[in-house]
Image (cartoon, helix red, strand yellow):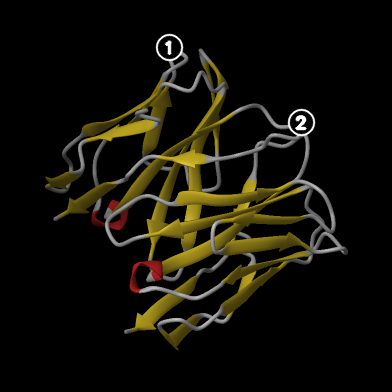
Amino acid sequence: NAGVTQTPKFRVLKTGQSMTLLCAQDMNHEYMYWYRQDPGMGLRLIHYSVGEGTTAKGEVPDGYNVSRLKKQNFLLGLESAAPSQTSVYFCASSYPPGRNNEKLFFGSGTQLSVL
Amino acid sequence: GQQLNQSPQSMFIQEGEDVSMNCTSSSIFNTWLWYKQDPGEGPVLLIALYKAGELTSNGRLTAQFGITRKDSFLNISASIPSDVGIYFCAGHTSGTYKYIFGTGTRLKVLA
């Protein structure tokens, strides 16, 4: 009954370092998303994917890259971390919209601090 | 980015009281979702609504899809200390990938 699993839970980076956040879902969902959550700004979409091998930009994609090589996995990369990327990152997944069964399921989050 | 307006922003209530909160939008949605988020955790889906006027319950929680399709309401009956957290709504339009999230209602329950 894992649902959406994110690793790591916490990470501290120095400015300029790179890292990859891992997300895995076991619900056979086609759609996957990466959000960041900041105080007063709510959840903002970074990138999303509508299926294996496809990715697209959300509203705040700069400084991030993603890959969806397998249906169950969605990776978020920070190429050169900046203090402005200090945030809590959430992965989410869902069935494709239009089946009257739209539900978005979230992982437990990654707290990232960039010094 | 766009956010939905939630009211109230925060509230203190006594244990055992009922709680009401709402979410409003300038756009029409086909789906309304309600989530609870505990500190240090991800949002957990409480209730999903798919039809205007729909009323759905999950234990002590009841949510309604507004008739205008521009609002939704969440009620919690007989609150208990573990109801503490942030509740937020999300709206979705059919055929799109995009979910729009509310600003959140922070609930604090006084024992």
Would you name the residue on which mark 1 appears? Answer: A70
Location of residue A81 with respect to B79 vertically, above or below:
above
* Percent coordinates x, y for residue A70 in the rendering: 42, 12
Say which element carries label 1: loop
Packing grade of label 2 (10 A; few <14, some 14-19, many >=20) is few
* Percent coordinates x, y for residue B77 in the rendering: 55, 73
Location of residue B7 with respect to B69 vertically, above or below:
below
Location of residue A32 with respect to B78 vertically, above or below:
above
* Percent coordinates x, y for residue B100 in the rendering: 63, 54
Horizontal arrangement in the rendering, residue A19 relative to residue A44 (left or right): left
Say which element carries label 2: loop
Horizontal arrangement in the rendering, residue B32 relative to residue B80 (left or right): right
The answer, for residue B36, to whether it is visible in the render is: yes
Horizontal arrangement in the rendering, residue A95 relative to residue A19 (left or right): right
Packing grade of label 1 (10 A; few <14, some 14-19, many >=20) is few
The answer, for residue A78, to whether it is visible in the render is: no
Location of residue B19 with respect to A83 vertically, above or below:
below
Nearest the eye: A38 or A105: A105
Query: Three-letter amino acid code at disc 1?
Result: Lys
Would you name the residue on which mark 2 appears? Answer: A98
Q: Nearer the viewer, mark 2 or mark 1?
A: 2
Task: Tell me which residue sits at (76%, 35%) in the image.
Answer: A100
Which disc, if any, is residue B6?
Answer: none
Task: Tell me which residue sits at (65%, 43%) in the image.
Answer: B98
Nearest the eye: A13 or A39: A39
The chain letter for the residue carrying disc 2 is A
**Outermost residue, right side:** B68
Quarter of the figure with the N terminus of chain A: top left
The chain letter for the residue carrying disc 1 is A
Horizontal arrangement in the rendering, residue A85 relative to residue B77 (left or right): left
Task: Tell me which residue sits at (61%, 75%) in the image.
Answer: B21
